[in-house]
Amino acid sequence: MSTARHVAIIMDGNGRWAKKRHLPRAEGHRRGVEAVRRIARAARAMGLEALTLYAFSTENWRRSEDEIAALMSLMKRFILSDLDEFAANNVKLRIIGDYKAFPADITKLIEDALARTADNDGTTLAVALNYGSRDEIARAAAKAAAKGAVTAEAIEAELDTAGMPPLDLLIRTSGEVRLSNFLLWQAAYAEMWFTDVLWPDFTTEHLAEALASFGTRERRYGGR
Ligand code: IPE
Ligand code: IPE
Ligand code: MG
């Protein structure tokens, strides 16, 4: 039974969670943050080397100004309330995506958080912010070209995830069965696990179930 080193999650379904309860979408996102806290703790307790969470895509700018503002405000509050716990528990924060497009106050909070956990060597918690895989690959290819030959290895070395363990398991909640521009390159040989559970309802038990399923898979990488 193999164990996963790097798990990534497309945290989807906050809006539908709220809609079912006749609540504003922002309330779904607020409950989504509670799930983030729960799952980040579980990842640490389970000894995962890396957990990558899709929090805001390059396409999510298409949402209403109100919803984007609610997401930004939640992000800010999350860093302020949870950074001490990450720092104290040897969690290394990392951002993938171009977070510098966010408002200056958030960019500053993010940079402080990265600096405070930079020397930690426990679980890496990578948060995808203003992340899109096509954008990431294009940026990586341009950097590789500036340095020399554009090989798969050279591109890989310039991806936002460079240096992280290979992606083992990709989870998506809420019943959608698509990647929505997330980790397209890294998912080449990742195992997939889809569930109808909406992200605010996602528990440690669901994560354990996904990891157990991963443990039974035979990964062949094209060889026999
Ligand atoms: C995921 O929940 C959170 C983000 C994309 C920020 P959604 O907001 O996409 O929820 P649904 O898909 O509308 O239910
Ligand atoms: C993907 O979810 C992005 C995040 C979870 C941050 P979306 O809800 O934005 O994806 P689509 O629109 O259903 O493909
Ligand atoms: Mg969605």
Image: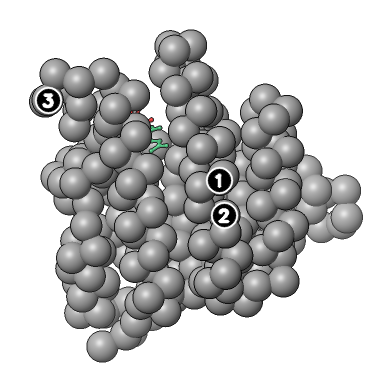
Please tell me which residue is depicted at 56% across the width and 44% down the height of the picture: 80
Residue 29 position by quadrant: top left
Residue type at tag 2? Leu
What is the secondary structure assignment of the residue under circle 1?
A: helix
Q: CA distance from mark 2 to mark 3?
A: 30 Å
Residue wearing tag 1: 79
Residue 191 location (% of width, % of height): 32, 64
Residue type at tag 1? Ile
What is the secondary structure assignment of the residue under circle 3?
A: loop
Q: Nearer the viewer, mark 2 or mark 3?
A: 2
Residue wearing tag 3: 21
Say which label, 2 or 3, has the lower sequence index: 3
Is residue 65 found left or right of 171 in the rendered image?
A: right
Residue wearing tag 2: 83
Task: Give the number of the disc on residue 181.
Answer: none
Label 2 C-beta lies within 8 Å of the nearest ligand 1 atom: no
Residue type at tag 3? Arg
